Image: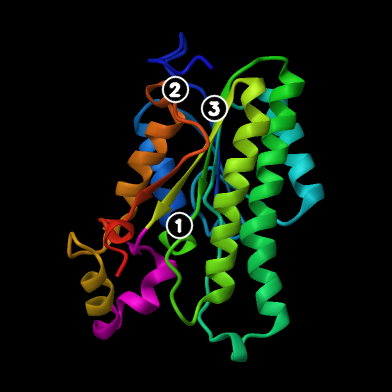
Amino acid sequence: MANEGADVDGTRGRVLVTGAASGIGAACVTVLRREGWQVVGVDAEPGGAPDVHQLDVTDEVGWDQLIAEVGEIGPLDGLVTSAGIRTRGMIVDTSLGEWERHLRVNVTGTWLAIRGFLRSRIASGEPGGSIVTISSVNATIAVPGQAHYVASKGAIAALTRAAALEAAPLGIRVNGVAPGPVRTPMAAERLDDPDQVRWLTGRVPLGRVGEAPEIAEVVEFLLSERASYLNGEIVYVDGGWAANAV
């Protein structure tokens, strides 16, 4: 993958980012472009975000069409799977539909993205590439009221490791980022509640909520050749929450 420094056209490669219209995905788009990557952004609700295409990540046909269209321009060098959802609710109050929606968007959407990327690299005949998934600190440290979300993020972490084994013979690295509490639209409801903020910051040794660009910086590192020997890892970007484990 020719992303060590700039290519002859001044870019470091082409990266597809899901969930690109807001939150961590939008921050990844900004950081990646700043670092010289060409970015193809997709989101279920682009909401007027510039250069972000509409795609429901659970739509298999939509993925096939997108990969074909992107491939006409040239091969993809990287993938960031930031699309995801989270709602709150105890198990006894959660419907089967809500449970399945989290698995479909968070897990199946990630799997379809990885499959599409791997197929595109094989079709290009060029070795190399890098995938970064977005898991969560809650993949390891469960919290009540979010079992459907916790399970989906744990599945993403496991999928990341399995994909790393399959992709390695193709020269493709697969790693994940596990954010702690981060200021994004998805977390707005919790971060607007002073009691929730006190609880969250009390769990984080650094004593604060993270910002989306802090996650994006780690994503960019994992995509790059600076992380050339990192594979199958889940990197916790959580202010020390996982180390604290209380």
Quadrant of res 230: top left
Element under disc 1: loop
In this rendering, position of residue 129 left or right of residue 233: right
Instruction: Count neighbours of disc 2 (C-alpha within 10 A) and say few if under 14, some if 14 to 19, many if 20 or more.
Output: some
Q: Is residue 56 visible?
A: no
- Distance between the alpha carbons at the discs numbered 1 and 2: 28 Å
Q: Position of residue 132 (x, y in %)?
A: 51, 40
User: Relative to 83, is 184 on the left or the right?
Assistant: left
Image coordinates for residue 52, horizontal then vertical, percent:
55, 46
Query: Horizontally, is 190 left or right of 63 in the view?
Result: left
* SS at mark 2 in the image: loop
Which residue position is annotated with label 3? 14
State the residue at coordinates (51%, 77%).
146
Disc 3 element = strand
Which mark sits nearer the N-terminus, 1 or 2? 1
Q: Nearer the viewer, residue 84 or 41?
A: 84
Magenta region: which residues? 180-196
Which tag is nearer the camera, tag 1 or tag 2?
2
Q: Residue 214 or 230: which is nearer the viewer?
A: 230
Image quarter in which the N terminus is found: top right
Residue for badge 1 = 22
Q: Position of residue 227 (x, y in %)?
A: 40, 26
Look at 76% across and 54% down and name the residue there: 59
- Which residue occupies 50% across, 80% down? 88
In this rendering, the answer to whether 218 lies above or below 7 is: below
The image quadrant where one finds the C terminus is bottom left
Residue 209 is marked as none
Mark identifier at residue 228: 2
Residue 189 lies in the magenta stretch: yes
